[in-house]
Image (cartoon, coloured by chain):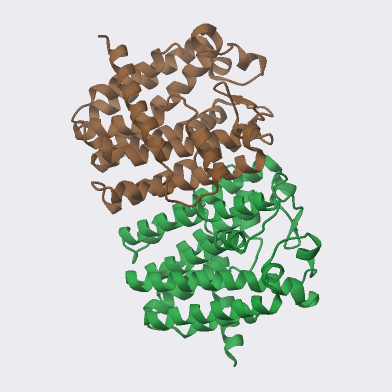
Chain colours: A green, B brown
Amino acid sequence: MSDTVLVKSYLAQCAAIVEQALTEVLPAQWQVPDKLRESMMYSLEAGGKRLRPALVLAVAEAISGDEDTVTKALPVACAIECIHTYSLIHDDLPAMDDDDYRRGKLTNHKVYGEAMAILAGDALLTHAFHLIPKAAKAGGVSAQVALDIVEDLAMLAGARGMVGGQVADMLGEQGITSLAELEYIHLHKTGDLVVFSVTAGARIGGATEEQIKLLEQYGRNIGLAFQIQDDILDLIGDETKLGKKTNSDVEQQKVTYPFLLGLEESKAQVERLTQDAKSAVLTAGLAAPDRLLQIADYLVQRDH
Amino acid sequence: MSDTVLVKSYLAQCAAIVEQALTEVLPAQWQVPDKLRESMMYSLEAGGKRLRPALVLAVAEAISGDEDTVTKALPVACAIECIHTYSLIHDDLPAMDDDDYRRGKLTNHKVYGEAMAILAGDALLTHAFHLIPKAAKAGGVSAQVALDIVEDLAMLAGARGMVGGQVADMLGEQGITSLAELEYIHLHKTGDLVVFSVTAGARIGGATEEQIKLLEQYGRNIGLAFQIQDDILDLIGDETKLGKKTNSDVEQQKVTYPFLLGLEESKAQVERLTQDAKSAVLTAGLAAPDRLLQIADYLVQRDH
């Protein structure tokens, strides 16, 4: 089998493990109003690539070289999916992007109303921080490592991370002019959660501080490359494979990498970022680096 | 000086320490979009009694009998104020209570718009979990204790805690009929953050598991007594002292303790809860229990 087929099947396997774990993420014995539970689970179980949690599992395994690490990393993988899901629920709200559909399903507020969607988002965001101590309790993750992961997540998902990127994107709709502004948005709005997934996996896998720093570079580079590739696919992708219309960025007059840099330079940028990501992994001296190298290639070779 | 004067001045002193710390709660070196920082700080610095953070400090000191514990407890005191503030911002949104003013100032969304208010709330909620690891780093709080505090906060502020209470309150507006429903709302919507403040202070002060359980009872009882007293004051309080109109609950046809139990039985309930709270503190055998006993009395003897 080719590397692409192997890595696709590996990521799908990780996604399946995460999907299963997500069904049990909210303790059954917790007294939670039924409608709130339903609204949280509706969005949590709405599918998606589960790429961030898969990265947590993949990196943890690459560091330790031991499949059992996956079990240790699972609560943190679910935590990042809670964060990602809350951000989608809030993004879709009428006051934000005002979207009625996501992945072919009605958005949370279209089903449960705006107030419940706001609260379900708040609850999912909060729940992520319940799951991280759980990783420590379940065993194998020390209190110090779990606390470092909490600190990382709070920084990378908060004002200095994802929320900051979201605000910059919102304010920038009035007209981004520089590459620096566009890069700030991508690095934070989407990139920081990728960086979190990678460093959290590394911490659980038992990485040294030096390895964590290198993997942070890996995460930042693949996150940005992924985003630029998204811009490129919107411009020149195959609508059938993408499952959505192309050229939407142009129609919405969105400022993208190809718009600012041109198509060829954008492609070259993706290539450079991917190479840098792979170099960082190779320098880190991991027990089983191959899969992370394959993932870096796969994310930018995808056609959808 | 009477106990009331003493405890009032002590709580005011704690509030002043917290107010000062809150001005520096968002690291200056963090790259955060200006408007987001402004919107977060606008609500964080909007005043209020700072009762929850004061409780964190008071309990930490009562356990250790050592004034220096206050410094150790300060980041967690700020964390609970971040949570409380985010919950007010989201509660005030048009989709929720749709309030234009809070404590005489325009609500967050009236100043910064709905989208920013949602995101500032999200960022404050997330930031609380950045501050707790900081308490450990600043020294004196072990990683295990900090992680236990993270776990408590995520439970008591999330779907099974404050957000659950908020949802129950919202759904209950169509008609609460039983005392059990009303109690669920009070215990979770407001009570759980009081329980958190008390148990977090206890953990930082070095309490044993047995003491933490007793202080949890203390927190639950004073939280509920405070809430019932609020209902009573709305009915028979002095508008000048309260700084707001009385009888608003009756006008809004809100189901309250006096409505369900009658005024006399409500007063008796407050008295019972306060006694139970004080018994729990006395049983716990703390280094300096007096102030916690005074706080329990003060919260229900207040006339505003």
- Above or below B214: residue A30: below
Tell me what residue is drawn at x 62 percent, y 69 percent: A227
Please identify the quarter of the rendering in which residue A105 is found: bottom right
Report whether A270 appears left or right of B230: right
Q: Position of residue A74 (x, y in %)?
A: 46, 66
Tell me what residue is drawn at x 31 percent, y 62 percent: A142
Q: Is residue B238 visible?
A: no
Please identify the quarter of the rendering in which residue A215 is found: bottom left
Q: Position of residue B259 (x, y in %)?
A: 58, 16
Q: Position of residue A118 (x, y in %)?
A: 63, 44
For the N terminus of chain A, the image quarter is bottom right
- Above or below B104: residue A261: below
- Above or below A62: residue B286: above
Tell me what residue is drawn at x 50 percent, y 43 percent: B124
For the C terminus of chain A, the image quarter is bottom right
Observer-nearest of B31 and A233 = B31
- The image shows a total of numbered marks equal to 0
Tell me what residue is drawn at x 72 percent, y 74 percent: A233
Q: Is residue A253 visible?
A: yes
Q: Which residue is farthest bottom? A: A1
Q: Position of residue B245 (x, y in %)?
A: 59, 11
Observer-nearest of A302 and A45 = A302
- Above or below B274: residue A107: below
Please identify the quarter of the rendering in which residue A88 is found: bottom right
